[in-house]
Image (cartoon, rainbow, N blue to C red):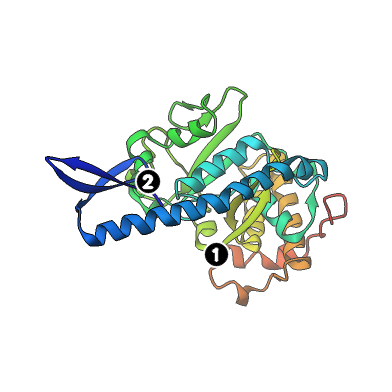
Amino acid sequence: MGGLYWNTTKGRRYLYEKREGKRSSLGRETPELNLRKTHHDQRTKELRTRVRPLASRLDKMAPVNRAIGIARMPTIAAKILRELDSAGLLGSHIIVAGTNALYAYEAAAGVMIGGQHVATGDADLLWDAKRSILLSSAGVVRKQGFMSILRRADSTFVAQHGLVATNSKGYIVDLITPEQNPPELVSAVDIDAQPIGGMEWLLAAPRFEHTIVAADGLPLRIVVPEPRTFALHKYWVSQQSSRSAVKSAKDLAHCRIVTTLAETFLALPLIAAQMPWLPAALRALIKDVKKLPRATGGEADS
């Protein structure tokens, strides 16, 4: 909501608003501004009264969530997503595109994907650079860079030659973007978004949003590509000649698992007519993906 406060200058009161570190004047005191300030203060008090017991409840449930095994996403990845969400970037400018996206699909389906399939030491964040230049909707990013958000999650993050960010434990954050974005749109001040082919297909798909639980036992919002599109894209990536055998096998496993979850638990069949956003390259792969064996109980357990 931001904050509203009065400031007196030369005997006259002016109402100021402070939001996301930026201060702006709303003008000299008037009955209308007085009423706005009163309503704002009342609403703030009401929300704080509601949030306080909810925050306490979350803290109490965190160890329970860990004990029953639903606390899944690594804490560092969760902290980064929470900061992106707080900055207003998650879902609007940035979505999760890599292995961490599987946490959204498994939570929505009510299953747990085998640990070997979700294990990863990095976070692939897909930036829709066409939405803004230099992530211009977020003042903190425009002034201090994308690293400012990562450092709020972990102060040890540093930019590696402007290409990726790593923390003291070796966790890597990749900011990626479609290849066709003009060069001037792929800079986030202190780290460059790396152009990768096929990413535009994931951005063209509907967003898939879910609430998951991190390893710290606390919930968070995650936004990923629509699951069938993700699965088809993984299959496409697995077939690229430049892909290593190890990575290709992992891509293929992700394809099979997410396809199984989509069809079996989410009522999302692989039917081209239901996915008008699909490019021809992915639409042509539907028949091949349908022939793949579905995930077994060891890969995704309900």
Can the viewer see residue 240? no
Q: Residue at x 77, y 47 (%)?
A: 70
Q: Residue at x 68, y 41 (%)?
A: 59
Q: Are marks 1 and 2 in contact (CB under 8 Å)?
A: no
Q: Residue at x 59, y 71 (%)?
A: 275
Closer to the chain start, of discs 1 and 2, is 2
- Name the amino acid type tagged 2: Ala
Q: Is residue 74 left or right of residue 297?
A: left
Q: Secondary structure at mark 1?
A: loop
Q: Nearer the viewer, residue 230 or 92?
A: 92
Image quarter of the C terminus: bottom right
Q: Is residue 300 left or right of residue 79?
A: right
Find disc 2 in the rendering and name its residue: 138
Residue 245 to residue 105: above or below: above
Residue 282 to residue 218: above or below: below
Q: Residue at x 43, y 37 (%)?
A: 146
Mark 1–mark 2 Cα distance, whole angstroms, equals 23 Å
Q: Position of residue 256 (x, y in %)?
A: 75, 56
- The disc at residue 206 is 1
